[in-house]
């Protein structure tokens, strides 16, 4: 396995690939001199707008219709383009704010593990503040 990953552990390989992608994004941005527009506020706004464009692809569709759309070649391409925009702006925001994305994700998962213990949250779409222990009688 490590041979296939260039001698890196799987985690280091993922981090290396993520760093490569971030470098590509920054190079693309810098070649166009767009960094001047990439304030934290503007990046957060762009991230929200791109997420809304992903939502727009599914607007007024049922869950079944949304799934069918994504299963189609064209629908998958449209969704991939929008999620790419979301990820690009999220990574640019992280870079501008000096946030390491993988650390932020792991921290949030740990936080959510505490908020949503398996025994209380499994199979439920309930906000953590409304989860209650079910008393068995």
Image: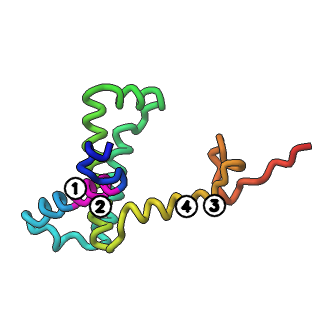
Name the secondary structure under disc 2.
helix
Q: Are marks 4 and 3 in contact (CB under 8 Å)?
A: yes
Can you tell which mark lies on residue 74? none
How far across and down, in percent of the image, does residue 54 sit? 34, 45
Q: Are marks 1 and 2 in contact (CB under 8 Å)?
A: yes
Chief secondary structure of the magenta portion = helix
Can you tell which mark lies on residue 114? 3
| Disc 3 from disc 1: Cα separation | 32 Å
Q: In the displayed structure, would residue 65 be above or below residue 115?
A: above
Of the numbered discs 3 and 1, the one sitting upstream in the chain is: 1
| Disc 1 from disc 4: Cα separation | 25 Å
- The quarter in which the N terminus is drawn is top left
Of the numbered discs 2 and 4, the one sitting upstream in the chain is: 2
Q: In the displayed structure, would residue 6 be above or below residue 80?
A: below
- Looking at the image, the residue that sits furthest to the left is 31
Residue bearing the label numbered 1: 21
């Amino acid at each position: 396995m490590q041979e296939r990953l260039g001698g890196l552990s799987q985690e280091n390989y993922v981090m290396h690939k993520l760093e490569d992608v971030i470098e590509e994004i920054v190079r693309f941005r810098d070649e166009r001199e767009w960094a001047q527009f990439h304030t934290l506020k503007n990046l957060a706004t762009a991230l929200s707008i791109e997420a809304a464009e992903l939502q727009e692809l599914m607007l007024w569709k049922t869950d079944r219709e949304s799934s069918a759309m994504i299963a189609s070649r064209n629908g998958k391409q449209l969704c991939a383009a929008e999620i790419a925009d979301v990820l690009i702006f999220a990574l640019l925001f992280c870079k501008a704010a000096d946030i390491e994305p993988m650390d932020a994700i792991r921290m949030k998962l740990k936080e959510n593990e505490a908020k949503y213990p398996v025994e209380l949250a499994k199979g439920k779409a309930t906000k953590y503040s409304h989860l209650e222990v079910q008393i068995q009688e």
